[in-house]
Image (cartoon, coloured by chain):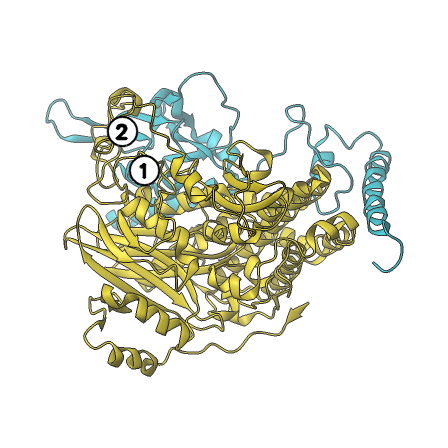
Chain colours: A yellow, B cyan
Amino acid sequence: MTTPSPLPAIQPSQSDISVLTTRFPEKINPDSRSGYSGWVVDKTQLLAFASALRDELGYDYLSSVTAVDYLPQDQIEVVYHAYKTTGGPGIVFKVQVPRASEVEIPSLVSVYPGAELQEREAWDLFGVKFTGHPDLRRILMWEGFAGHPLRKDWHEPYFEEDAKPLKSRWPEGHPVKAESRNKYGDNIAYPDGFEPQNKTFDPEKALYDALQRNSPDELGLSTDRIILNMGPQHPSTHGVFRIAVLLDGEKVINLKPVMGYLHRNHEKIGERNTFIMNIPYTDRLDYLSSMSNNFGYALAVEKLMNVKPPERAEFIRVIMAEMTRISNHLMAIGALLNDLGAYFTPMLYSLEERELILDIFEAVAGSRMMCNYFRFGGVSRDLPEGALQKIKDLAFERLPRKMDEIERFLSENEIIRSRGIGQGVLTAENAIRFSAAGPLLRASGIPYDIRRAEPYSIYDRFEFDVAVRQNGDIYDRLMVRFEEIRQSIRIIQQAVKKMPEGPVMALKPMYQVRVPPGESYGRVEGPKGELGFYIVSNGKPNPWRYHVRAPSFINLTAFGPMCIGQKVADVVAVLGSIDIVLGEVDR
Amino acid sequence: MNDMYGKGILKGLGVSLKRFVETYLDDLTWFGKRYRTDAGIAHRASKNARGIFTVQYPEEKIPVPEEFRFIPFLVYDEGRNGEKILRCTSCGICAKVCPPQCIWIVRSTDPATGRPVPDPAEFMIDADICMNCGLCAEYCPFDAIKMDHDYELACGKRNVYDKERLSKPALYYESIRPINAGRENAFRAAKTAARAGLSE
């Protein structure tokens, strides 16, 4: 069920864009700041520009939307990254507006519905009001939160300094416990007009209104509907994730994901950190596939620094990333079957193989899950003795055998087939529209895999198929993951055979790297989909902006549309088939 | 799917049954040595593991690999009279690279001149904040701070480790990380030799 490689990468021809520049004279200008690329679009022309981009130039996939607060320039910039699902490099376009407590920019949801959750995030964290957005509410913070935390002038309780390393640690580092410095209760700010003692304030009102409980049904009758909250403490939500479902009997009429319970403002922490400090923090995003997270971040920073890791390091990186994919998919398969009611047996069978992979990570990187293994310009250390043999044993012997067994165990099971086939369908068009990524996109028949579409590292040297299935239902998502595991095993088999000897670091180990000013977007095909890191450096030791395009988060944009019309029991199965990790959703 | 309904389920149950039986078969072939022996534990973590692979912690423990890292410690060499000489020079690199900023160092000053002395007066690690990333050990230029293997640290209070608690002998370090320690010792010896050669 795989296709040969998709079309060869198409270079975005400069003439393509020049069509647009002539159409919107003086409204679209190339970004001329040094280290930057892309186009600056006037906000009045944003919608027209985006429609033309999508319909005429074929940039049908909006990968990432985020904002940057340029405090010194007194400017807020919203940055969009769009790609073609036929492959090739993407296009970056930006909208700049003067800084104010709330800025307004037209929403792109009507052109790219995949922007929905991302625009909500930008509103929540930056105070960018997207006019025309159908449901602009806070998403990671709660209603009643004061301020927009990713603004550079916003400071959290326990704020000490804008940038690490903190001066209080050395040379006069007399320890102070943060909790003793700032007692609870003294540091909560409320928005203007907000009265915490006011019992009439209902923080859930906006959410329930968004579900449109009282809209008439298809016959025009006002039907009694119920709102069901699944989570945040619910065993099937894979963490602290809440789903508000509007039900007519057992049928789902509307569904809104509610998230942010695990929010820690990873991006603000990342902007306080120096570049190297962020590597262990990326481990904690999608904690089931930390090596992939390291990979994306390392690529983004290496792009800015213009370093290339040595050959051996590239091979090690690819092997580790593919092993991560295997372990993540095993976990996803196990958890999905758990959600489908198979209870813990398939989960334990998956965990058994994952365990052997984690043993290798432990021997190589020092930790089973929080690997912290990649460095800018290579990896932190070479493979220890015996690790390569273990990888070979797994890739050539154990994993192929065990994958056959797990597939025999499950794929023909009648319960799984009847719960999976034809349920939670995401059509190909919708998958692209909602910016779904990874197995979710490929199960809907779009053979889009960044490893093929825009090869990074040394993926262009390996033979592998892009796993793809056509129906876009739960069963296909399960099967795509099986296939991807097999392809990953294939890549590892090739990589261990070809792996050269040599150094694993291109640079001298430096605890503070020099990153030239500019922006970069590094993206990898993570196990859950496109994992992107958008980084803006201003030449200082800390990134000015550090944004994570989290695949589990953006895949949830399609969650509601996939569930509408299904039974409530299928919501659990659909969520399981998306494969989310809350560390990454909430960041 | 065209034949009997439930065949897929039966097939799956067959796999379960096979794995159930395998555990007991493995028990028989190992003849009671499958549990609580090093070879047994190693077997259960190997590619040939069959059947149940649970390790009965804490009666059994998986041996940790050399690179395993948990909470840093300070390495000291023993002087002629058995005094502890910390390798740390309180240069502060570990405190500057620490991502959660859990390392606190007070640099000593010479009471006579007021100049800084390469020796930490205080060295604290907030072990509850430490994320075990190992960057301090990786970037320490003096091999003075290293990551430990001891992971059984659960306790009921806040863990702020002071210099006393953090100091461990170089011999201990060599015992937990023989390969790394050997490489570093050789490198340091070569460096001292080169320096001696220069000064002659």
Q: Position of residue A112 (x, y in %)?
A: 41, 62
In the rendered image, the vertical position of residue B7 relative to residue A427, given as above or below: above
In the rendered image, the vertical position of residue A64 relative to residue A55, given as above or below: above
The residue to which callout 2 is attached is B105
Badge 2 element:
strand
A34 or A241, nearer to the observer: A241
Marks 2, 1 in one chain = yes
Q: In the rendered image, which quarter contains the N terminus of chain B?
A: bottom right
Q: For the residue carrying disc 2, how many other residues have a C-alpha within 10 Å: few (<14), some (14-19), or many (20+)?
A: many
Residue at mark 2: chain:
B
Residue A507 in view in this figure: no
Q: Position of residue A166 (x, y in %)?
A: 24, 36
Residue at mark 1: chain:
B
The structure residue drawn at horizontal position 72% and vertical position 28%, both measured from the top left corner, is B36
Q: Quadrant of residue A88?
A: bottom left
Tell which residue pokes out farthest to the top in this image: B156
Q: Quadrant of residue B74?
A: top left
Q: Which mark is residue B86?
A: none
A548 or A299, nearer to the observer: A548
Give the residue type at disc 2: Ile
Q: Position of residue A508 (x, y in %)?
A: 34, 55
User: Would you say the residues marked 2 and 1 are in contact, meaning their CB atoms lie under 8 Å apart?
Assistant: yes
Tell me if A107 is positioned left or right of B35 in this view: left
Q: Position of residue A224 (x, y in %)?
A: 55, 38
Tell me if A37 is positioned left or right of B51 in this view: left
Tell which residue pokes out farthest to the right in this image: B4
The residue to which callout 1 is attached is B94
